[in-house]
Image (cartoon, rainbow, N blue to C red):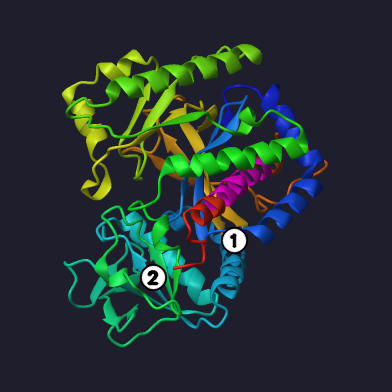
Amino acid sequence: MIPRLTAALSGPLFALEKKFLEESAPIEQWFRAAWQEHTPPFYASCDLRNAGFKLAPVDTNLFPGGFNNLRPAFMPLCVHAAMSAVEKFCPSACKVLILPEHHTRNLFYLQSLARLVLILRYAGLETRLGTWSPEITEPRELVLPDGQTLLLEPVTRHGNRVGLKDFLPCAVLLNNDLSGGIPEVLRGLDSGQTLLPPLSAGWAERRKTRHFAAYDAVAEEFADMLNFDPWHINPFFAACHDLDFHARHGVERLADSVSELFARIREKYREYDIRETPYVVVKADAGTYGMGVMTVRDASEVLSLNRRQRNKMSVVKEGLAVSGVIAQEGVHTFEVMRGAVAEPVVYMIDRYVVGGFHRMHIARGRDENLNAPGMEFESLAFDTACNLPEYQGKPDAPPNRFYAYGVIARLACLAAARELEAMGTPAGAA
């Protein structure tokens, strides 16, 4: 199914897609040079929003959990990308231990985990699953709806390495975002055991504001190379920390930051004659799963949050308290699938785009967060990979639209690589 846009692409984004298509050779050369200087994370996913006048990332996840939503036809691409990543990070690896999230009752997540296991096995790695969850003290078989089974086993320490009772892996792949903190079992590991991504990629240490600061620089350099306004691919944002929503401490500062953002957004809307109503999304600076998110259309709304709204913004996944937020320019989405507002999510392994899907929500509007209960997923409907444009086609033809998605997602992946480097832990370091 091909997504349709509720607004025709005749403005800046159409011109941008046309530029991407015409300049694909220098774009790919630019990326090749960038990857020689910066090591991409082992894997990542990027949430995009397509406003018709802007195509920008709004979130970058370094522990993707939706591999089950990728088209099976792209399994070979996933496997080849995984082989490339393994050769880069741990060329002698023959065994890998995946450490997943603890929500073992989420069947959709388990299906993603099964797909990830299959990708690594096809890549030539003996792959097993481990957990530090206190609820699992003995091997537990998990049965999926399609009859597949996964064996989840408690992890153990072997000196300065982590593994299973009878399994000592060369590499450990985290698929747990560490919202609950860094467990003791993962601290002080031997540098000879490769941990991917590094612990600093988890929400115990990572911050969205740092990521988008890195993306600011990447977008600026990329736009300068192609000579266009980076605002078309980059949402404005502001950081606000030392907050306590329950006690209303710091909310005045947050309202001021939001007000300044609105002023900057309205100035751009006037510059490009955009008639849409601007909005700002306030998100927890650490966390995922769409928790700790609110949409505001006026700065005064920040000062008038009711108790329910303050509770929602105070705590995210694993009970992680919110003391800092990112206030981010809202990017409308004009994509619609099956009558529902939709946004593309692009998946990458190493530096390669390996597929993606549309997140849809029938009950949400084009200026609302779609990562919420009731969302559905539809695999990206293209016959070739996101990095294979049709040069003879129109800029907004599906393969070329998806090529543009892949360009933006790779920029976000490059920003993630720089972000981790700035934290002192390159993507392949423990």
Q: Where residue 199 appears, x then y in whole percent?
A: 39, 62
Q: Amino acid at mark 2?
A: Ile
At 48% from the left and 61% from the top, the residue drawn is: 425
Compared across the picture, whether 136 is left or right of 423 comes to left
Q: Nearer the viewer, residue 84 or 343?
A: 84
Q: Quadrant of the C terminus?
A: bottom left
At 32% from the left and 64% from the top, the residue drawn is: 144
Q: Where residue 390 appears, x then y in whole percent?
A: 77, 45
Compared across the picture, whether 395 is left or right of 140 comes to right
Residue 408 visible at all:
yes
At 29% from the left and 61% from the top, the residue drawn is: 182
1 vs 2, front mark: 1
Q: Amino acid at mark 1?
A: Thr
For residue 285, which numbered disc appears in the image? none
Give the spatial CA distance, label 1 vs label 2: 21 Å
Q: Where residue 427 appears, x then y in whole percent?
A: 51, 61
Which residue has dot 1 on it? 39
Magenta residue check for 404? yes
Rendered position, 122 above or below 267: below
Which residue has dot 2 on it? 98
Q: Residues within 10 Å of mark 2 (few under 14, many from 20)?
A: many
Which element carries disc 2, helix, strand or loop?
strand
Q: Nearer the viewer, residue 399 or 410?
A: 410
In primary-sequence order, the first of circles 1 and 2 is 1
Q: Where residue 271 appears, x then y in whole percent?
A: 65, 14
Numbered range of the magenta stretch: 403-416
Residue 141 position by quadrant: bottom left
Which element carries disc 1, helix, strand or loop?
loop
Magenta stretch: dominant SS? helix
Q: Nearer the viewer, residue 194 or 335?
A: 194
Magenta residue check for 386? no
